Image: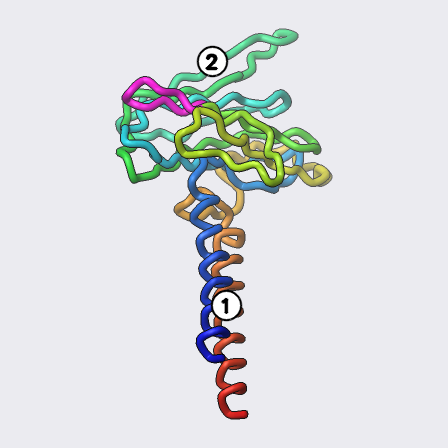
Amino acid sequence: MKSIYTGICAGVALTLIFSVHVSFAHVVVSPSTASGGSYQTFSVGVPSERDATTVGLRLVIPEGVESIRPNMKPGWKIDMKKTTVSDKELVTEIVWTGGQVPSGFRDDFIFSAKTPSGGTVIWKAYQTYSNGSIVSWDQAFVPGVTFSHESLLGPYSQTVLSAAAPGSMDHDMHGGGPATSQAGMPISHTLLLPLIAIGISLACYVRVNQKLKL
């Protein structure tokens, strides 16, 4: 009986913990939520999952996202593609090249921007490897559908925007925004599943001991 309870508990805990690592295995733009009409720091988490080095990243800037300012990144060349709309110059893409993210490692690419007043921002990114392959992170997420590490397609990221606060668009506060983890995810999201797993493990441990005493 003890082994059965222990096995179930371990399986649940490991499943939850493993799901955190799976979420890190994609190119992810964070945070996943932000204030509308505000200046926000975004982080693009880029893992090299193949037997090759990541040598380039292209991020498409969604319509309505303005005032793009990438952080300096030693070893990488940063280009911003622009277009002019109604006499206003807008950044349409950020392209990082010349650097390296070796296989089995990851890195963060940081930039700040002003968000639209509300809605959902969709981030499409394109990751270039040293062997010439390009992984397109531009697919809609479909529940139950998984993306293989060998696939050249992956899900895009989304940032859900809350309603713009009064006066929030009047100040150029570049560099603000919630803290992110080393995985490029909001800290609260990163810790949530491990904490749940620990809680379940402790509850199972107590339950097993109670059964044994009976």
Q: Where is residue 24? Give x, y as percent.
A: 44, 43
Give the side of residue 167 with respect to residue 44, left or right: right
Which residue appears at 28% of the width and 22% of the height?
130
Give yes or no for residue 127 being in the magenta stretch.
yes
Quadrant of image for the C terminus: bottom right
Which residue appears at 56% of the width and 12% of the height?
89
State the residue in front, 210 or 165: 210
**Dot 2 surroundings within 10 Å: few (below 14), some, or many (20 or more)?**
few
Give the side of residue 63 with respect to residue 96, left or right: right
Residue that badge 2 annotates: 81
Describe the colour scheme in one phrase: rainbow
Task: Identify the image quadrant of residue 144.
Answer: top right
**Dot 1 surroundings within 10 Å: few (below 14), some, or many (20 or more)?**
few
Residues in magenta, as a range: 126-135
Task: Identify the image quadrant of residue 25.
Answer: top left
Give yes or no for residue 78 being in the magenta stretch.
no
103 lies above or below 1? above
Question: Helix or strand or loop: what does disc 1 sit on?
Answer: helix
82 lies above or below 151? above
Give the residue type that dot 1 points to: Ile
Residue that badge 1 annotates: 8
Which numbered marker is on residue 135?
A: none
Which residue appears at 47% of the width and 23% of the height?
136
Question: Helix or strand or loop: what does disc 2 sit on?
Answer: strand
Q: Where is residue 44? Give x, y as percent.
A: 45, 34
The secondary structure making up most of the magenta span is: strand
Q: Where is residue 138? Give x, y as percent.
A: 53, 25
